[in-house]
Amino acid sequence: MATVTLNFPDLVKLIGRDVTLDQVRTDLFELGLETEDVQGDEVTFEVTSDRADLLCEEGIALMLRAFYGIRTGLTIPAIRKSDYRLIVNREVEQVRPYVTGAIVRNVRFTDESIKSLMHLQEKLHGTFGRKRKKGAIGVHDLSAIKGKTIHYRAVPGDSVRFVPLQSDVEMTLADVLTKHPKGVDYRYVLEDKKLMPIIVDDEAIFSFPPIINSKRTEVSIDTTDLLIELTGEDLRTIDYMLNIVLYSLDMRGAEIYGIDVVYPDRTIRRPDFGVRTLSVDVTYVNNMLGLELTAAQIKSLLERMGFGVSEATGDYVIAGIPPYRSDILHRRDVVDDVGRAYGYNNINPTYPNTPSVGALTADSRLAGAARDIMVGLGLQDTLNFVLIGRDEVSTKMNIPAVDDLVEVANPYAEQYNVVRPSILPSLLIVLSNNLHREYPQNIFEIGKTARIDPQENTGVKEEDRIACALCYAKAGYNEVKSKLQSLCLNFGKLEGLRTIAADHPSYIPGRCAEIRIGDRTVGIIGELNPVVLKRWGIEMPVAAFEMEMSALK
């Protein structure tokens, strides 16, 4: 959960209707935002991580304007033409491959609006942008930028000097990463890169993404024209982040101008306010919500949630998704918004026909017991996505090809295009994202994995597995085996436990073994191959094991 603090009088102006604080608090609670604190005119709400568009008061005002019927349906800001071009050099592909942006003119900043923009920028960095790793925003005074052709490049860290924000001292890029507070905070994003990304105009560098901007293009309350640039690892993510920022500025009357982003193999026009559509059956909506709504009623409710509806027949509606709603992935997400507009408190609860008593399954109890034991052994529990990138389970693990992966047909991003066949890559993601933290870093996870298996009825074999990774200077085979033995001891499996020497490309030859319990091979244990560690950017030794949870039954 993230929080957003807004100025209530400013919110009322943006809504365009006199509303009381109590009414707004009640309505926002119905829409999924809970009030956390009220201090005078400052109100703090909790926002769920899926609604990044609500991390500013402009986004909340836009939602309430539709909900109150002031302006229902899709809101699509006008995009005016400009002569600005952003040229992407090929060398950034291995550093930070994607960039997007827009020009914004006739901005009229107030104390509240400039504060809201800066807060939105940081909230998006911390949530949607994954602490600037997946996406980061730069906001610049357009009047300070020379020329209309901007270049996104990658250069050695000691080849360029500039004066960063919050400093009067000229520094190299490498100096910024070690001496500037923002550089120290976010250098982990670039620590394994040989080149550093920069954005330059006709004069010099004005942005060192995702770390800090140049002081030359600093934005003040007197700034009227802006360049918004975003860089990141996933184009779709930074496009959504850009749209959220632009919608917030549009709510305050600014004008948006497009920019051509010129990649080596294509040119794209940004921003992209294209509208995705989803067809939703009326019967499906009513079955999900337990209501008897008509297509016309569903259309009206969706328009109160900011959707456009291009067609509403007796059988289905076609919903147009707002360009800032990254959370709408499936028709059930549309149904959820229908329910919010209708009011979940207005739905009469009914008892199920067959009463039952809830209880944990045997597998859940087993996982809970194993989790308690691992925590007791001094390891930290982690929770990672079941979806992962193909490269992370093959190339980075030193495995030439993995043929039995469960692939996602329509992945949200390249980082999530397959279901993980093993938990260990997920743990290595955690370790690679925490290079700047103290050691030892001893972690584990209990979770789902899946592989293609024609012998299964579904064609996919799904397993609960447990994996452990020890990462510190003296991490080795003996240390991780002691964790495995302690785990098995607590489940009465120590007597049947054996480790048999084996070879695996992810592990050091001679420092790897199969885990057997009884006559069955249930996992693998060993010290990770230096090739694997290098590909993940991990400089400390890592010893790990992974095994089937069913072996502990």
Image (cartoon, rainbow, N blue to C red):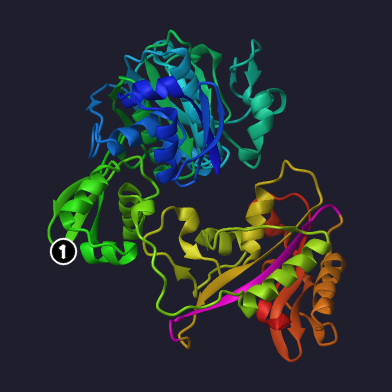
The kind of secondary structure element at disc 1 is loop
Residue 180: image location, x then y, percent: 68, 23
**Residue positioned 23% across, 40% down in the render:** 73
Q: Nearer the viewer, residue 101 or 358?
A: 358
Residue for point 51% across, 78% down: 356
Quadrant in which the N terminus is drawn: top right
Amino acid at pointer 1: Asp
Location of residue 179 by image quarter: top right
Region in magenta: 457-473
Residue wearing tag 1: 315
Q: Can residue 50 be found in the magenta stretch?
A: no
What percent of the width, then of the height, locates residue 533? 70, 55
Judge by depth and name the residue closer to the eye, 369 or 22.
22
Mark 1 surroundings: few (<14), some (14-19) or many (≥20) residues within 10 A: few
Residue 198 or residue 143, whichever sits in front: 143
**Number of marks in the rendered image:** 1
Q: Position of residue 355 (x, y in %)?
A: 47, 78
Compared across the picture, whether 250 is left or right of 53 comes to: left
Which residue occupies the extreme left position in the image? 313
Q: Main secondary structure of the magenta part?
A: strand
